[in-house]
Image (cartoon, rainbow, N blue to C red):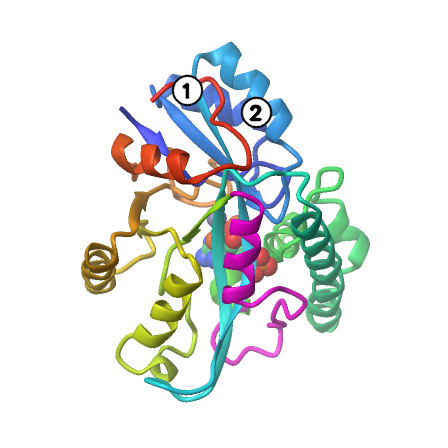
Amino acid sequence: MKIDLHVHTDASDGKESVETVFERASILGIDAIAISDHDTTANWSKAAELAVQHSIGFVPAIEVTTRAHFADGDSRPAKFGVHMLAYLPDPNHEGLVERMRKTIEGRVIRLQEITETLSPVYGLTWDAVLDQVVGDATLGRPAVADALIAGGHFENRGQVFDAIWYKGSPHYVPNRAVPDTIEAIELIRSAGGVAVIAHPLSRVKDRDALGDKPLRHFEQMIEAGLGGVEAYHREVEAQDRNWLLALADKHDLIVTGSSDYHGLAGKDNELGENTTSIDNLRRIAEQATGIALVNLAI
Ligand code: AMP
Ligand code: FE
Ligand code: FE
Ligand code: ZN
């Protein structure tokens, strides 16, 4: 069975509609997908209908933006963004809804700040960024990238990220108005969901600050109720994956694999390029109490 537990649509920074994503999953013979847009459940109900139409299983999910705070232990003080997948949380849980609302608000302000730093360089305007976004989609740097591409400055998102958001770039503004990792895990659990770290240890700009591996922080997250790690993802390096697999083994964590698909024009990641075993999906479903799997009996 082909199960891909991390997929984006145009409800956040994916380039394709949820309809197109399900069509593509169907063409590729994928049995089940999670729709895991950044900080939103906006496409869940459409996905539930499409799942039935295409005879594909649907796993409701959110990629929750969080921030890790290291104060002591095996690393010097550091803060950086961590994406936390929430599987099968109750989408109407008050605490979760309120937290997402704050995060989405913060994402708007932060993207406006980023846009301001780029306007002297590329003549970028806020309207040009908004032109790239469908409806109420949650905003991220890919919208800025798309605006710069539309303005003829770059050919694809990868080029923009390499050119603009390198380490120490003046154009980088962090997502500050987000929960920290521990708070996010507790919130996801209280909403009946299962928390799985997305692409763990990837995209950390100041990797040296972590020391060898941030074991203490992982232990704290496990203590808070972390359910699993997305060890199989193209941005997780082999050495990190081995460390994560050993940690998962020791603490009996769920292990997932996913594509992090953002549409054919969004990123190279192809639907189903990494997959999750049915046993691991079953463990997610058994631990969750927020909402049920759709069109999927396992
Ligand atoms: P943000 O949410 O604003 O921090 O932007 C992060 C998002 O940008 C990620 O979720 C990815 O979808 C996207 N992203 C990061 N790096 C790249 C890249 N090199 N090429 C294309 N998209 C990227
Ligand atoms: Fe994304
Ligand atoms: Fe992510
Ligand atoms: Zn993602």
Secondary structure at badge 2 equals helix
Residue 205: x and y in percent read 43, 74
Residue 68: x and y in percent read 49, 71
Residue 259: x and y in percent read 37, 41
Residue 273: x and y in percent read 31, 37
- 238 or 278: which is nearer to us? 278
Disc number placed over residue 283 in the picture, else none: none
- 19 or 191: which is nearer to us? 191
Q: Which residues are magenta?
A: 165-192
Residue for badge 1: 296
Residue for badge 2: 47
Q: Label 1: how many residues lie within 10 Å, few (<14), some (14-19) or many (20+)?
A: some
Secondary structure at badge 1 equals loop
* Residue at image location 33% in from the left, 38% down from the top: 283
Amino acid type at mark 2: Ala
**Dot 2 beta carbon under 8 Å from ligand 4:** no
